[in-house]
Amino acid sequence: MTQAAAPAGAVPAWGVAFFAALAGACGALGHPPFDLPMAIAVPMIAGFVFLYMARTPRQALFYGWALGFGYFGLTLSWITEPFQVDAAETGWMAPFAVVLLALLLGAFWAAAMSFARWAGGRPWMLAVAWAGAELLRAYVFTGFPWAAPPQTLVDTLAGQGLAWLGPHGLMLTMCAVCAIAVTRPVRAPWAAIPAVLLGALLLRPLETVLSPVTDHTVRLIQPNAPQHEKWDPEKIPVFVNRQIEFTGAGDTVPDLIVWPETALPYLQEYAQPVFDAIGAAARGAPVALGIQRADDAGYYNGLVVLDGAGQVTQSYDKHHLVPFGEYMPFPALFRSLGIKALADRADGGYAAGPGPRLLDFGALGTALPLICYEAVFAHDVGRAPQRPAFLMQLTNDAWFGMRSGPQQHLAQARMRAIEQGLPMIRAANTGISAVIDPRGRIVSALPLNTAGYLDERLPAAAPPTLYARTGDLPWVLLILAGLVASVLRRARFRRTHAIDAGETGA
């Protein structure tokens, strides 16, 4: 049919799948804590090689699934950490969580490779289908775009393409260049030039000259409350007093003070005495802090802004919740299966807020608040009612452990800054709290698993990026066009061969 029908030689399918999983695992080295961006080329180039080796769509599905399983299994190995917080109750789920998540996410890559093989096995078909699979992964079932291949590029000049293309346009570009690197040099050596240029960009780090800054100082508070101690009645006063002490520290009063997600272990309705103490410590500066609240609809993971008197002036409720973490999908199913630990979480889950909104900080301008997981979604940030002056993330990365999870979460926050051309201020419970400029560079940060505070000038916003103006729509349309073209080409091929077969029979 095409060159994709070439046999795999003497290597059995399971052996090819083993090497596919190994190639996928190599791609994990592109993410923190390894930070070797060139490593992402291994699974991406391998994907086109395995497409060539696959004889059938089913075999391509098998290879693609193995490739994705190896990639996501190692990259997201930190997912075991939340299950260890209450190890006696949920620790047994940890290995199953890694395997099932890797299988689920690997299915997107498997579907892309199987479709490309079914449609004709052309490399451009896989490039389009692979980018389409990553686009779907960001949206379906509330989305989970963590560990997208473009995430490995934030420290490189190539990562600045996010400002023009966004994550899905950059993914399509990466696929196209890898396809050319695999298939074209034999026929036209000059066609390898884009791959060489991309490699040079990957190897070139960003320059250290940072963006202009404003005259306004922000203070980020990092209490370093381990998750297994955060709600301990004996530890609560320690962490609360620590944050109040950091709020009032130093001789200079900042223009804005930011505490992390669920910084106070009380419901908002009962927290006014603590708000009063915070207002006194802040010496007139506004304080944004994470706190839970409740109403007739349920509990909310939100934040409030306190004025100099400790009074709530603005609030925001998280609207993009974490499945299985902040709410339980299909609780009746888990009850019927007898998985009590999961079913019980449904009763204590959060309700979703109404959606993105801006907070007004006077001379500093407006901020788009993002609570933890919300910074993972490029399209959510693009849904802001108007363009803010800066992005503000409050997060509790203690759930993600002390290894790669918090670092990968920070990388995604940096992606959002690049995409929008906006600075990001990020307060994290156990770290990594950071001030990020509009090109995604870290101006300053507090190390992981340390307590402290950070005063830094707020970077100035850059002009709106192309991606901030267009969002994902151009790439949705381009990918759809490529998928339709793949289907039409297959249909045309089948018709042609049916006619040839009929003439031969006649």
Image (spheres, grey):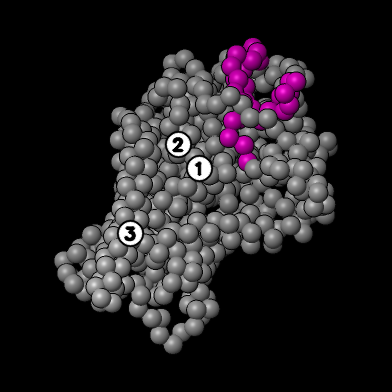
> According to the image, label 1 marks what residue?
139
User: Can you give x and y, in whole percent of width and height, for residue 325 in the image?
Assistant: 68, 43
Identity of the residue drawn at 45% across and 53% down: 133
Identity of the residue drawn at 43% across and 43% down: 415
User: Can you give x and y, in whole percent of width and height, for residue 273 in the image?
Assistant: 75, 17
> According to the image, label 2 marks what residue?
379
In the picture, measured across the screen, residue 53 lies left or right of residue 229, that is left
Report the Cα–Cα distance between label 3 and label 2. 34 Å
Identity of the residue drawn at 41% across and 51% down: 132
Q: Label 1, secondary structure: give it.
A: helix
Front-most of residues 427 and 15: 15
Where is residue 226, by image quadrant?
Answer: top right
The numbered mark, 3 or 1, whose residue comes first in the sequence reads: 1
Q: Which residues are magenta?
A: 293-322
Q: Which amino acid type is marked by label 2?
A: His
Tell me, yes or no, whether the two marked residues, 1 and 2, touch with CB atoms within 8 Å: yes
> According to the image, label 3 marks what residue?
491
The numbered mark, 3 or 2, whose residue comes first in the sequence reads: 2
Q: Label 2, secondary structure: give it.
A: helix
User: What predominant SS class does the magenta segment belong to?
Assistant: strand
Q: Which amino acid type is marked by label 3?
A: Ala
Report the Cα–Cα distance between label 3 and label 1. 29 Å
Confirm whether the magenta stretch covers residue 341: no
Quarter the N terminus occupies: bottom left
User: Can you give x and y, in whole percent of width and height, for residue 400 in the image?
Assistant: 63, 49
